[in-house]
Amino acid sequence: MRGETDLAKLVSGMRPVLDPKDYVFGTFPENALTDVAVHGPLGLFLEAEGVTAILPLDVALKLAADRSPDLGLDVSRTFRRITLTVHSSLEAVGLTAAVSRALADAGIPANVVAAYFHDHVFVPAEDADRAMEVLLQLSLGSVDIA
């Protein structure tokens, strides 16, 4: 099934949903991949420096307690996930830029993960409600996407 590519439709139909869970980003050596993968990370990305994991906070706390600190899990900085529920095409142009720009204009950092069906925006937990307001205003056309 092919996703939407029209930017106006993507923005107006993005219907952001805030996940109630807290998440952390961490990094660890590739040889620990299996140990982390069995705990159900939300996402994994292989980088030259190691594996980046997006983990629910409760999973990260368990891993940090069970394993040595070499896993690189910093649980002091938590994020919330906002899912843009519109089915965006992997070839769509502009949605990530529009969302990032709106959040940046509001002074909110954002880490965007584009998955097959949806885009997921990770924002600092303390900014999550304000980020939702910004994205809802963007989807209603109250924020310019140009």
Image (tube, grey):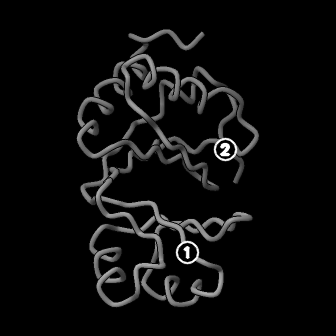
Q: What amino acid is at disc 2?
A: Gly
- Which residue sits at x=40%, y=79%? 69
Name the one closer to the observer, 34 or 74.
74
Against 135, residue 34 (above or below) is: below
Quadrant housing residue 44? bottom right
Q: What amino acid is at disc 1?
A: Phe
Against 107, residue 92 (above or below) is: below
- In the rendered view, does 122 fall on the left or right side of 48? left
- Which residue sits at x=36%, y=19%? 106
Quadrant housing residue 74? bottom left
Circle 2 is placed at which residue position?
Answer: 3
Q: Earlier in the sequence, mark 1 or mark 2?
A: 2
Circle 1 is placed at which residue position?
Answer: 28
Quadrant housing residue 25? bottom left
- Which residue sits at x=58%, y=20%? 8
Name the one closer to the observer, 37 or 76.
76
Instruction: Determine the secondary structure under disc 1.
Output: strand
Whole-percent x and y of residue 137? 35, 19
Q: In which quadrant is the C terminus drawn?
A: top right
